[in-house]
Every structure is written in structure tokens, then in C-alpha cells.
Amino acid sequence: MSSVRPRHRATPVRRLPLAGVLRLNRPSDIWFKPALSVVVAVGVPNLTLLALGRLDLALYSMAGSLCALYAHNLPYAARSRALAQVVLGMLASVAIALVTASLTSSAVVLVAVGALLAAAHKAVSDLTRIGPPGPVIFTFISSASLFAPQTLGQVPGHLALAAGAGAWAWLVGMAPGLLRPHGPERRATARALNAAAGFVDAYEAGATSGVRDEAGHERARAAGAATAAAAVHAAWQSLLATGARPEPRRALERLVVRAEVALAAPADTDAARLRTWARDLRGTNPVPRVASGEDADELLGVETELRETGPAARMSGKGGKAGRSGNRWWTWNDRMSPLLPLALRTALGCALAGYVSLALGVGRPYWALVTAASLYQANLTLTWSRGVQRVVGNLVGVLLFAAVAPLAHLGPTALVLCCLAFNFGAEALITRNYWLGSICVTPMALLITEFTGFQEPGGLMTDRVVDTLVGAVVGFVAAVAVTNRRAADRIETALDTVEYAREHAARLIAAERPGSGTGAGPAAGPATGALEAARRRLAAALVELRATADAAAGEWWQRALPQERMMLAEQAGHRTLAATVRRQGPHVLEDAEA
């Protein structure tokens, strides 16, 4: 593997898209889970405060309640830890905001603190990969808390209220596990099977088309392979998130193996059967049995070595270039370095948006700050798309608030029920497209400000429109000003990691007696574990390369990307992955159709 990195000429500025930005997607397969969870998590504390006549404290209870939006895709053991960390992170953010608010009333200082908190939320969310809804909930709550009148003596009580609501949100998030203890793993496995079936369909379409549109089918196969590899890798991440291996989970592992077999031998795979297995995983039906436990376990390898490529290993770069995985400085630098430009964008954009809002005399500059914070995605193109979606959704949402305000003003009970309805609508719709969810988020945010007392709708609507436009424009300008020049460097690093992992796997395949196994048939013991660990490592590296390339491709001012090297690396990597499946157990390929 050559260590010489070619120089790439600068490319012209990329166009920012408009077509498709507002297109609706298919809803998430679990859209109703976060929607129902947030209604229960928010509703119980708010209705309790309503009964006590202290609805003015609802901001602090919602700080904890909105934590129920997170970690719905994680297995319950991992979700338990993740939700606890989300609640602790929210309490820390709110504590900083409340103490700052109690010490100063200077809007300039409050905006600066809010911008720094937003940057910290962005960095930590990306670092931990907590997933939707990302950092925006933390920023929304902490920014609103900064501008809530406060004294130091009130801070402990308000934090206790947030902590109590956070504990309730934790219980709400964990409650579905009583009915479907392996629900998240089943969904992840079903996605892997469906993605593998899609790849098989793309392969068959290309095989039957001859030379006609060969380039188009090749692109479709490559896209299908990348999507399926990512889904399979995500399924393994879900299955290996906990140490226990009860029989339902072992059966799911065998199904994921079949998805990997489909990637290795698409011509010998029945896509309809994969989809049937995925469909059978819905509800509480028994997990389909697809092979003998002995054969599947041989392919799975040694559990301890599999875990070397779990979430923690992928985050730390374990299995990458030799010599780095044990160096804590390299681990920290590799993880934090790519996040610095995004954190800087967030801090600068949020601060400028808040200050412009102050200069225009808007009474709630934190709305502009939150709008700017909500824009920042993995690259400038996605940030632009999010900005368009945010503006469209907020403007339509303001009109919806105008229609609903008379109903909400009938009394505190109507106000709380309207907020709960918008909570449900936001989570039910946001997976279709961000702008659609924003239509419900906007009136909900406006109604929350009235928990302390009804206000004149016209003023609220005007402030919201101005802050939305200010936050979107200023936030996007900051994103343009802070270029992410490190994105291309990350591609070079990701390519090196893929090539190293592929060469390591290829050496194990080529060896006559890898490890302590034999040259014939599936190896046993350490040999199976070594090849399995190499396969996991290569799969994780390929997924990371594709994510890194997609992020870099959307930057507006970037060196030309090494497209040919990426294509060759991905093709060689997927061929090696297929070879590892064949080397570990040829009989498993036969079982896929048995």
C-alpha cells in the first residue's frame, strides 16, 4: 500500500440544490414510538403541574421529558445507558443556563453562552452518534432557560423538577422492552434483510440487461451494495451492543448472516425469501429459523473477537492503521478533529444570529439562535437543504399557530392538550421530511411561551418569523465562511484504513492454515475468530469510508475527491468481504437456499 497521497486540484464551487429538498420520504417504521413516547413523557408532568396550578414551571419539566425522544433504535440494555446519559447531559446544560441567567441579565452575555452551549451540543452529539433528534433539543431547552428570569435560590428546585421528569422519560423509553425485549434488534435485522434483498434485485436487473445501460446498472449495484453493507453493519452493531446471547438473539444473528451471504453470492440468493424473513420479524412472531445452530455459530466466530469491532472500537478507530489503536492521543485527535469545523460553524452562526436578532429589537433572540443551530449538518449542501426546510416549515407553522391560538386560549387545559397534539404531530411527521415536522414544532414552541400567561398572537408570530429568517440566513452565511477543509483529509485516512483492513483479511484468506484452523472447510476456534474479526473490521471501514465520502462531497469549497481510488477501494473491499464469507463456510452459502 503506497503512502504517497496524490494532490488534487481545487474544484469549482458546487451548486446548492432546490429540487427534492421538500420531497416527502417514506415514514420511519417506528414513527409512532417516539410520537407516543413524547406524549406520555411530556403529558404526565404537564398535567400534574396543571392540576397544581404551576404550569409556569413546565419549561423545566419539559427539559427532562423531551429526553424520551432519544435512543429508540438502540437495544434496551444500550438504551438504558444512552437515555441516562442524555438526561445527565440535559441537566448539565440546563444547570449552566440557569446559573448564568441568575448571575446576569445581559442579553449579549446570554447569547454568547447559548452559542457556546450549542457548539458543545453539536460536538458531543456527533461524537457519541446519539442519533435523532440530535443536538437541537438540548439547544432549544438550554437557550430558553437562559432567557427565563431566575435567581440562584430557584435553581436547585428547577433542576430537581427537570431530573424528576427525566427519570419519568427514562421509564417511558424503557417500558416497551417489557413487551418486546428484542424489538430494536429485530427491526435492525429486518432492515438488513430488506437492504440485502434490494441489492439482489439490483444485481439481477444488471445481469439480465446485457450491455444496455450497463453503466446505470453498475451504479445501482454499487449503491445497493453500499446501502446493504451499512444496514448489515448496523444490525451487527445492534446485536453486539450487549454481552448476553439468548436464543432469540442468536436466531437474529443467523438471519444477519444470511444478509451477508446475499451480498457475497447475490446470484444464488432468493430476494423474496429475504423479504419474507424480514416481514416475519414484525410484531411478536417467533424469529424465523433458517439454519442449524452449529453452522451459523461457526460463521459467527468467537464472541470476544467480534466485539473488537463493536461501536466502541469503530469510534476509536480500532482495527485501523497499525500503532494508532493503542495511542490515546491519536484516538482523541481522530475523533475530535473532524468535529472542530462543525463546532466552530455552530458557535459563530448561533452567536451572530442572536446578536442580529437583538439588534433588530426582537424580544426572544434565542429563537434565532436555535434556528441557526438546527441548520448544521454533516456538510454545507445538507445545511442548505435543512435551512430551506426549516424556513418553509416555520412559516407554515406560524400560520397554523394563528389558526389554533383561539382554541388554545380557551384555558390552561386546552393549552396543554394543544401542545401534546403538536408534540405527537412533530414526531409522527418529521421522518417524512424535516419541514413537515417543523410545521408542528413551530406552534408548539409558540404555545410553550404561553405557559406563564397568554400573550398577543400577533407579536409572537412576528418575532418568530423574523427570528426564523435571521437565524437561517445568518447561520448559513457562517457555514459558508467556516469551510471544512479537513473533510478531504478524512477521506484519505478512511481509504488507508479500508486498504489496511482489506489486505489483512486477504492475507487470512490466502493463508493455507490461518491461525490454528485447517485449510479445508470452516476453520475452528481462533482461526474462525480471527477471520471474523477481520471481516467485521473491513465492513466497518467500508461503511465509514462511504459516510466520510458523502460528507466531503457536499462541501462547497473542497479539493477534488479521489473518486477513482474510492471506487476501486470499495469494489475491492466488497469482493474481499464476499471472499471471507465463502472462506469461512461454503456450506452456509448452500443453506441460504435450503
Image (cartoon, rainbow, N blue to C red):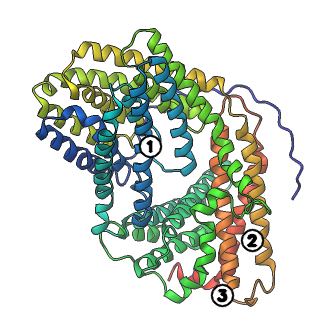
- Frontmost residue, 146 versus 389: 146
Marks 2 and 3: which is nearer the front?
3
Residue in the picture at 78% in, 71% down: 506
Pinpoint residue 441: horizontal percent, then vertical percent: 33, 33
Crowd around label 2: few <14 · some 14–19 · many ≥20 (10 Å): many
State the residue at coordinates (46%, 61%). Answer: 191
- Circle 1 residues within 10 Å: few <14, some 14–19, many ≥20: some
Tell me the quarter of the image containing the N terminus.
Answer: bottom right
Amino acid, disc 2: Ala
Q: Is residue 245 left or right of residue 394?
A: right
In the picture of the structure, the residue carrying the numbered disc 1 is 92
Which residue in the structure is indicated by mark 3?
Answer: 525
Which label's residue is closer to the chain start, 2 or 3? 2
Image quadrant in which you'd find residue 156: top left
Mark 3, secondary structure of its residue = loop
The three-letter amino acid code for the residue at tag 3 is Gly
Secondary structure state at the residue bearing disc 1? helix
Residue 241, percent across and down? 50, 67
Q: In this rendering, would 483 be left or right of 67?
A: right
Residue for point 79% across, 87% down:
513
Query: Along the horizontal axis of the image, is 111 left or right of 427?
Result: right
Tell which residue pokes out farthest to the top in this image.
Answer: 360
Label 1 is placed on what type of residue? Answer: Ala
| Nearer to us: label 1 or label 3 | 1
Horizontal side of 331 relative to 472 (left or right) equals right
Q: Nearer the viewer, residue 110 or 4?
A: 110
- Would you name the residue on which mark 2 appears? 505
Question: Does the residue at mark 2 contact the one at mark 1 (Cβ under 8 Å)?
Answer: no
